[in-house]
Amino acid sequence: MSPLNAAAPLRATRAGTGSGAQQTFRYIGSCAGVALTITIATSSGRLREH
């Protein structure tokens, strides 16, 4: 999703709000993806020990 798509339903005076919201969710998704990858990579051996 591009910033233009995120801001499309908003009035021109509020276009920055849509773009900012899109960027915020993008950063949150990136952080969650990195955290999940690290969790899986570091815990793979623990599941076999039990």
Image (cartoon, helix red, strand yellow):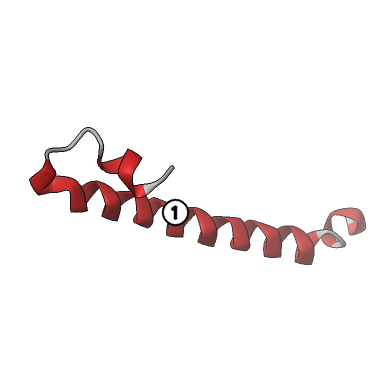
Q: Is residue 43 left or right of residue 13?
A: right
Q: Is residue 14 left or right of residue 19?
A: left
Residue 17, percent from left and from top: 20, 50
Q: Is residue 40 left or right of residue 8?
A: right
Q: Which residue is mark 1?
A: 26
In the rendered image, the vertical position of residue 3 relative to residue 49, given as above or below: above
Residue 21, percent from left and from top: 29, 50
Residue 33, percent from left and from top: 60, 56
What residue occupies the far left of the structure in this picture? 13
Q: Secondary structure at mark 1?
A: helix
User: How many residues crowd around disc 1 within 10 Å: few (fewer than 14), some, or many (20 or more)?
Assistant: few
Residue at 8% over, 47% down: 13
Residue 10 image-quadrant placement: top left
Residue at 13% over, 47% down: 14
Residue at 20% over, 53% down: 16
Residue 3, percent from left and from top: 34, 48
Quarter of the picture containing the N terminus is top left
Residue 8 image-quadrant placement: top left
